[in-house]
Image (tube, helix red, strand yellow):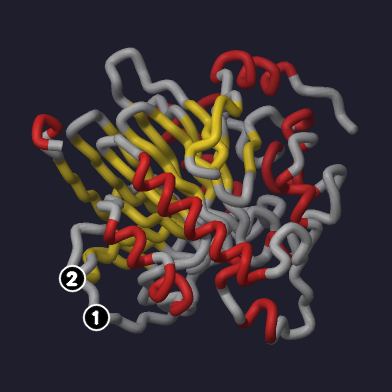
């Protein structure tokens, strides 16, 4: 096991991301905002390919944008290591796909990550292990958890166990079921913990992050299990954004019957699927290519931007809230 890097130790000391309590069954990590109360976040998914498929090029632009925005942390929407996750905590893929790729100083901030279906193909417990933070102090990955950033809370949800086909028809690629068996109980507990946490939340902004899409017009499309079981909870608790990866593209879809917005940021490496299938909700933006997303927050304003691999802003969306009426 490699010794902690100097940067890793600095990151751990500066951000003090400590598990301080549990919110309705979910671990909570606290992240400070800037002195002016603002927060800047980058969101990227489906990236871990040892720098290939333009991962390194996207990473370079991610670093430049991170510097421009003075980013506070990075959200990973899963499929962190292709094709079959990590083999263990000493797997070289962790450095070759993460530490050795996202090297910009602006990205020396916490990375909060969820698991994707490709991560479940490997030793899933290794990605969840705190031992990885001894290699790179930026890394935090748990099945489901909350990042509390004062006026905003980010609810991370482990969506892979929801998708029945991974367990009933795995196409010869087994998924690591340790920690989620029996699956039905695990899903029920995850949904209850999330609903309880959302009920307890007093944050102005509430964002839920998972790997699989609820709404998508790309190759994977909607995830029926999430539409049926997760979406009603999000709508009932006034969640502002559902953010995912899985489809290797960038998307913004608005619900037709609720203020919730569905955002896909899965363009971290291999992309260009060539599939577009509209659904019944309102498509605001679709880019079948590589890139990432940013979120700039104050107490009463949210600005979301989608970037291409060259740093061009492809789409921007702004929302505001009357904080005195909340």
In this image, 126 relative to 189: left or right?
A: right
Task: Give the secondary structure at mark 2.
Answer: loop
The residue labelled by disc 2 is 256
Give the number of callouts.
Answer: 2
User: Does 43 sit left or right of 105 as displayed?
Assistant: left
- 283 with respect to 113 (left or right): left
Dot 2 crowding, Cα within 10 Å, few <14, some 14–19, many 20+: few
The relative height of residue 220 versus residue 177 in the rendered view (above or below) is below
Q: In x, y percent, where is residue 100? A: 71, 38
Closer to us: 170 or 195: 195
Question: x and y percent of residue 199 in the render?
Answer: 35, 46
* Residue 172 place in picture, x, y as percent: 79, 83
**Tag 1 or tag 2, which sits nearer the N-term?**
2
Please name the residue shown 36% across and 18% down the image: 34
User: Is the residue under label 1 in contact with that under label 2 (CB below 8 Å)?
Assistant: yes
User: Which residue is nearer to you in this view: 191 or 103?
Assistant: 191
Compared to residue 135, the image places residue 210 above or below, namely below
For the residues labelled 2 and 1, the Cα–Cα distance comes to 8 Å
Q: Quadrant of residue 21?
A: top right
Q: Residue furthest right?
A: 1
């Amino acid at each position: 096991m490699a010794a902690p890097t100097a940067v890793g130790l600095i990151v751990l000391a500066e951000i003090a991301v400590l598990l301080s309590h549990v919110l309705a069954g979910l671990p909570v990590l606290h992240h400070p905002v800037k002195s002016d109360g603002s927060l800047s976040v980058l969101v990227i998914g489906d990236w871990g390919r040892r720098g290939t498929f333009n991962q390194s090029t996207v990473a370079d632009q991610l670093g430049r944008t991170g510097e421009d925005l003075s980013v506070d942390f990075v959200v990973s929407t899963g499929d962190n290591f292709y094709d079959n996750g990590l083999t263990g905590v000493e797997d070289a893929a962790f450095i070759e796909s993460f530490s050795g790729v996202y090297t910009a100083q602006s990205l020396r901030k916490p990375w909060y990550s969820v698991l994707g279906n490709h991560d479940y193909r490997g030793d899933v417990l290794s990605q969840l292990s705190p031992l990885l933070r001894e290699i790179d102090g930026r890394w935090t990955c748990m099945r489901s958890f909350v990042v509390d950033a004062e006026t905003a809370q980010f609810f991370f949800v482990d969506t892979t166990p929801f998708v029945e086909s991974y367990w009933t028809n795995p196409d010869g690629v087994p998924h690591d079921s340790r920690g989620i068996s029996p699956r039905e109980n695990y899903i029920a507990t995850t949904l209850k913990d999330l609903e309880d946490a959302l009920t307890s939340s007093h944050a102005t902004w509430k964002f839920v992050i998972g790997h699989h899409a609820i709404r998508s017009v790309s190759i994977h499309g909607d995830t029926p299990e999430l539409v049926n079981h997760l979406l009603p909870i999000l709508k009932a608790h006034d969640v502002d954004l559902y953010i995912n990866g899985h489809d290797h593209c960038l998307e913004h879809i608005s619900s037709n019957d609720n203020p919730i917005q569905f955002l896909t940021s899965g363009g971290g490496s291999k992309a260009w699927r060539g599939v577009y299938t509209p659904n019944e909700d309102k498509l605001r933006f679709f880019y079948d290519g590589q890139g990432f997303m940013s979120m700039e927050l104050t107490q009463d304003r949210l600005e979301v931007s989608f970037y291409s691999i060259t740093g061009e802003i492809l789409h921007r969306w702004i929302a505001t809230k009357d904080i005195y009426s909340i």
